[in-house]
Image (cartoon, helix red, strand yellow):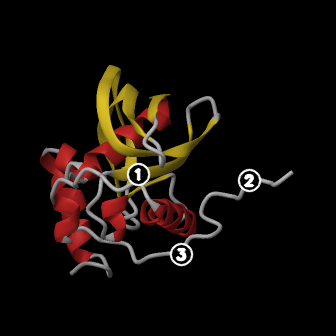
Amino acid sequence: MRQASIPGSSGRVRPMSLLGDPVLHSPCEEVTDFGPPLARLVEDLYATMYAAEGVGLAANQIGVAQRVFVYDCPDDEDRRHLGHVVNPRLVEADGVSVRGPEGCLSLPGLEAGTPRFDRALVEGVDLQGEPVRVEGTGFFARCLQHECDHLEGRVYPDRLTGWRRGRVLRAARRAPWSR
């Protein structure tokens, strides 16, 4: 019996797009080609996410403006959620709105209290174009909303207002990775 490979084990780690890179601030294109290049992209997303010690990664974070993200994220009960979604749509985000610490691999070393709903439902397809539904609560719901935001051209500071937004944007301008 052939053992399933570990996600990302055949992928390559790609450079991360950082705050200010235009690819992070524009909506991504729908995926229409479900061939080998998409499978390679998903493998590279996993490899890059694991190398950066993240829990989710959208394709535009590695410079590819396509609607794809991967995740390996616990929920608040410490249950692991592992997968990918192609052409995702956030179809529900509801429940209690919780302001919690949120970071991003495209803003390394920074985080801010960001409001997110406690429940999220994402629908899309897998690598073969088959429908998938991913539902999350707590921290995993935050991850799903965060990755869907990326594919719409938003980063978490876009969800902030007032002093929280000002503080994280000032810190980003002073960061060693800033452009």
Secondary element at tag 1? strand
**Residue 47 spot, x, y in % from top left:** 55, 67
* Amino acid type of the residue that numbered disc 1 sits on in the rendered structure: Phe
Dots 3 and 1: beta carbons under 8 Å? no
Which comes sooner in the sequence, label 3 or label 1? Answer: 3
Q: CA distance from mark 2 to mark 3?
A: 18 Å
- Residue for point 31% across, 79% down: 177
**Residue 60 spot, x, y in % from top left:** 30, 62
Residue 96 position by quadrant? top left
The C terminus sits in image quarter: bottom left
Secondary element at tag 2? loop
- Residue for point 40% across, 78% down: 15
Q: Nearer the viewer, residue 159 or 150?
A: 150
In this view of the protein, can residue 156 be seen by the observer?
no
* Amino acid type of the residue that numbered disc 3 sits on in the rendered structure: Arg
Please give left or right for residue 63 compared with residue 27 in the image.
right
Which comes sooner in the sequence, label 1 or label 2? Answer: 2
In this view of the protein, can residue 72 be seen by the observer?
yes
Q: Which residue is mark 1?
A: 69
**Residue 58 spot, x, y in % from top left:** 37, 56
Q: Which residue is mark 3?
A: 12
**Residue 13 spot, x, y in % from top left:** 51, 75
Q: Nearer the viewer, residue 53 or 99?
A: 53
Secondary element at tag 3? loop
- Residue for point 24% across, 76% down: 174
Q: Which residue is mark 2?
A: 4
Q: CA distance from mark 3 to mark 1?
A: 16 Å
Which numbered dot is residue 148?
A: none
- Residue for point 62% across, 29% down: 77
Which comes sooner in the sequence, label 2 or label 3? Answer: 2
How packed mark 3 is, by other alpha carbons closer than 10 Å (few <14, some 14-19, many 20 or more), is some
How packed mark 2 is, by other alpha carbons closer than 10 Å (few <14, some 14-19, many 20 or more), is few
